[in-house]
Image (cartoon, grey):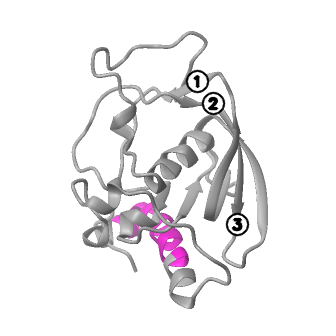
Amino acid sequence: MILMDDITRDGNPVLRSRAQELTFPLSDAEKEMGHKMMEYLEVSQDEKLAEKYHLRAGVGLAAPQVGSSTRMAAVLVPDDDETQPPVFKEILVNPTILTESVQGAALSMGEGCLSVDKDVPGYVWRHNRIKLRWYDLDGNKHISRLKDYPAIVVQHEFDHLNGVLFYDHINLDDRFKTTDGGVLIG
């Protein structure tokens, strides 16, 4: 199981490098990494287990965050109603954002990251809607349309695959500047 000590921290060059595409069929080790990243998200979202293993809760984890410069990420966005299945739960291999909305969106509380140990205040403006193409661990192609919070989470993880961290998007001159037509989520 991936623990907090296994998470690559800000300052490690792997977080600032463009990750390499994976080729199919994936190796057993690559598939196992995908499953372990999803397991981390599942365990971290369970309060009792997260406390037991000293995990910070996460909704996304990209391969560079576990030291692998490859284009894979796990995303687990729970439903607000805990009795319902997750809004989006997938292991994304070689994801590509095909289209994005003009309308921006940002989390009203700002973003955080398992790889960044400090709080970095400010709005992180992203696209409110995206169309995403990705492959599962078996190489099957999928296309998903995401909006609001799930779209923000996927864009955060997608940035990790391109060597970008969330705070790179914060306007340092006006950290809480709003944009015309932008939506604050949460």
Tell me the residue at 62%/41% (across/down): 151
* Residue 173 coordinates in the image, percent (x, y): 28, 15
User: Which residue is under mark 3?
Assistant: 135
Report if residue 154 lies within the magenta region: no
Residue wearing tag 1: 104
**Is mark 3 in CB contact (under 8 Å) with mark 1?**
no
Asked if 164 appears above or below 161 in the picture, the reply is above
Observer-nearest residue: 150 or 175?
Answer: 175
**Residue 49 drawn in magenta:** yes
Q: Secondary structure at mark 3?
A: strand
Left or right side of 13 for 132:
right
58, 80: nearer the viewer: 58
* Pointers 2 and 3 in contact (C-beta within 8 Å): no
Q: Residue at image x 37%, y 45%?
A: 165
Is mark 2 in CB contact (under 8 Å) with mark 1? yes
The secondary structure that dominates the magenta segment is helix
Local secondary structure at mark 1:
strand
Q: Magenta segment, which residues?
A: 34-50
Residue 156 visible in the picture: yes
Q: Position of residue 13 (x, y in %)?
A: 27, 60
Amino acid type shown at disc 2: Asn
Is 85 on the left-hand or right-hand side of 19? right
- What percent of the width, then of the height, locates residue 37? 48, 70
Instruction: Name above or below for residue 186 compared with residue 20.
Output: above
The furthest residue to the top:
180
The numbered mark, 2 or 1, whose residue comes first in the sequence reads: 1
Q: Position of residue 104 (x, y in %)?
A: 58, 24
